[in-house]
Image: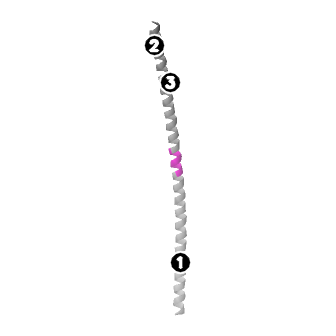
Amino acid sequence: MGLDAERLRTQSMTEELQSACNQAVRAEQFAAHRQIEAMRSEFAEDVARHRAGEAATIRALKAQVEELRVSRDEMLASESRQASATE
């Protein structure tokens, strides 16, 4: 009778330990999942900021190109007028 009682006690303790381990694993998985989601969110925000910065740089460069184009066209027109006036 003593062995049966000891076996039941051991089995019960094993089940409790298994349950505690399973809960710990679930808690770790949940924490890891939350951490991964936070990292994904931070990455997405970083990408959005980077793209916004790139877009602003591209707009500024396009504006500079347009200014240079206008200046060039004005200079060419002026040179053309001067050449016509000297002929």
Marker disc for residue 72: 1
- The percent position of residue 71, horizontal first and vertical second, equals 55, 76
Cα–Cα span, label 2 and label 3: 20 Å
Disc 2 residue type (three-letter): Arg
Q: Residue at x 54, y 92 (%)?
A: 86
Q: Give neighbour class at mark 2: few <14, some 14-19, many 20+ (Cα, 10 Å).
A: few
For the residue pair 1 and 47, the one nearer the viewer reads as: 1
Q: Give neighbour class at mark 3: few <14, some 14-19, many 20+ (Cα, 10 Å).
A: few
Residue denoted by label 3: 20
Local SS, label 1? helix
- The percent position of residue 21, horizontal first and vertical second, equals 49, 26
Disc 1 residue type (three-letter): Arg
Between discs 2 and 1, the one toward the N terminus: 2
Between discs 1 and 3, the one toward the N terminus: 3
Residue denoted by label 2: 7
Local SS, label 2? helix
